[in-house]
Image (cartoon, rainbow, N blue to C red):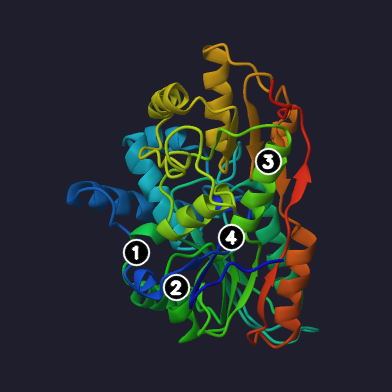
Amino acid sequence: MIDSQTDDTIFGLDAGATAGFTIQVVHAMDHQVMDGLRTAVIVPGMSGNIERRSIAAQLADRIEQEIRAGTWKAELPGKRTLADRHGVNVKTCAAAIELLAQRDLIGPATVGKGRTILPQPKSRKSKGRLSDKRLLVIHQSGGVINVEDYHLLQRMCDIWTRSHGEVGWAVVDFPRCKSPGPQLDVLIKRHSADALLMLMPGSGWHREAHRRLPFYLSGGPYEKDVPLSLGACKIDHEVKRVVQHLRDLGHRRIIFPTEGMDEGLWHAILDGLRPENGAKPEIGTWEDHCPQFPANVPEAWDAYWGKTFARLKPTAVIVHEDAHLLSLYGYCFVHGLKIPSDVSVVSINYEPRFEWLQPRPAMMRFPANLALAHFQHWIEGGLKPIGMKFFPLEMAEGGSLAKIR
């Protein structure tokens, strides 16, 4: 696989998360720009105004007491139930739940399920393990982890548990974290961590982690002068593959809208859209074909689609988050656009429940088994840096692609 590296900074992204990516990304970027990227941590109680933070923190303390008292055993009830029980609004309850996740009391959010109550640390004495060490999993806060990402993390944790022992979970608002070092110190101390597994961390986290503990990156930005272990695939390469497939079907007006995306990642996607011969698009600029929609609000995205379709008249759309795909399907249905006869759709993200959509979208799937083998190699190597490993995405063909008419 060709590496787009041109200098010292490369971006890797796993899904996921997050906030929705299920792929991992790599892209070269200017080192000075990397050093100047904005990041900032939300420590417990740092969101909203002072009064709301205080209420959320107090509510988190109260729910923590209930958990430790056995009021809630397997999982927490929903936000509305907890909000009604404690006489607060849902927004405050949601903030309190995030604080509980940061305290490693509950697991990450998953669609259709309550937050799992995590077992509390017990004696670290064990038999038949390489050692007794505690792994801390860190991922983006404020969103639902994609099913594929969550399963991958869980399988990684299972591997760790068999070889070393306990696993803790923590959430961080990576885009707002300007000082990852102090936040890492807090998390490492709180969770008694001996090693880190970070899902798509923000800029600078790999460097600060290297100064503290062994770590593994499941995606996320890094600089090559920092020894590391990373499992990823190259987004510019994968976007080029998808774009070429669409061009083979006759499409020329292809768009890839984004939202809240890191600048380096956005440039990687833009590089994937641009043809290697330097040809200009039929309408507007290539930057126009990779629009950055500023708000993560359903109603706003309907308006964004309207303006973009009116101006660029795309015949194919690439998306990277589940919500974006659902929004596009809804927009097309409401406005009488047929998929795929009027517009073809590809998701650089695999979501098994989308198999039920009609037409079933074409999706790109990250090879989890290869990533697990690389993670296990890191563990068996004594948690020492083993470098980066890139994996090509697998195309799951659907009914959302058609030749241009």
Visible residue check, residue 63: no
Dot in front, 2 or 4? 4
Residue 261 locus on image (x, y percent): 43, 51
Which residue position is annotated with label 4? 25
Which residue position is annotated with label 2? 205
Secondary structure under badge 1? loop
Residue type at the position of mark 2: Trp
Q: What is the distance, in whole Å, between disc 4 and disc 3 at their CAs?
A: 18 Å
Numbered label attached to residue 355: none
Quick check: marks 1 and 2 in contact, CB under 8 Å? yes
Numbered label attached to residue 39: 1
Dot in front, 4 or 3? 4
Q: What is the distance, in whole Å, between disc 1 and disc 4 at their CAs?
A: 19 Å
Outermost residue on the left side: it is 50
Query: In front here: 30 or 283?
Result: 283
Please tell me which of labels 3 and 1 falls first in the chain: 1
